[in-house]
Image (tube, helix red, strand yellow):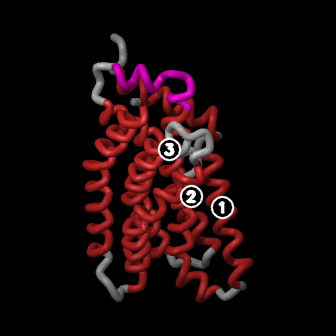
Amino acid sequence: MRPHPLTSLFLREIRVARRIGGGGTMGVVFFLILVTIVPFAIGPDLNLLSRIGPAILWIAALLATLLGLDRLFQADHEDGSLDLLLMSDTPLELVVLVKCLAHWAVTGLPLVVAAPLFGLMLALEPEAMAGVAASLLVGTPALALIGAIGAALTVTLRRGGLLMAILVMPLSIPVLIFGVSAASAAYSGTVPFLTPFLILAALSLGTLAAAPFAAAAALRHMSE
């Protein structure tokens, strides 16, 4: 029995992401470098590090998620695969969604797994590390979906990575705000954890509903 075209696309995207961007290793190493640099910049104050640790981890995750996003559609545009995807019977919105899922599986999911370990470097409490991991698990898909819109808008540019980051980062601010709020609420107790966490989940569901259509519309426009 032949696999479903979307399943084949997902497996292809995993292989291409590993070949072009080094898979999740590059994102985790970049994540580690950012987390390591911050204590050198602000000093060895463990109380300060533990207080701002969730924000550091979330900012590092946001920047690490941007790695390889500029190649999400550009590689297909360069080798002609994008034209085939546009002409296929499979809705382009589902193609975009599958590509985003593959990108998140390769780059976002390893960050979720590595975040508690890196939290030890920032003197985070176990509750804080659990909050960071849970918020990243819910929030990083939204970052990948938002990034797909920027990648679609810059697909025809040879070096559109910087422009894509400029487009994506302002749109990612609400996810960053509630992601840090949820992670901080897990151990501070000043705000119920579920309040920012559910808002973060709602943002992810909202981007899940809207981003594939926006990215697909941008791809159709750029291909004309």
Numbered mark located on residue 107 in the image: none
Circle 2 SS class: helix
Residue 154, label in figure: 3
* Image quarter (top left, top right, bottom left or bottom right) of the C terminus: top left
Which amino acid does the dot numbered 2 rest on?
A: Ala
Between the residue at mark 1 and the residue at mark 2, the CA separation in whole angstroms equals: 9 Å
Image point (54%, 67%), residue name: 59
Magenta stretch in the rendered image: 75-87
Q: Nearer the viewer, mark 2 or mark 3?
A: 3
Q: CA distance from mark 1 to mark 3?
A: 28 Å
- First in sequence, mark 1 or 2: give its number: 1
Contact between marks 2 and 3 (CB within 8 A): the answer is no
Residue 181 placement (x, y as % from top left): 39, 76
Residue at position x 57%, y 56% in the image: 64
Identify the secondary structure beneath mark 1. Answer: helix
The answer to whether mark 1 and mark 2 are in CB contact below 8 A is yes
The type of residue carrying mark 3 is: Thr
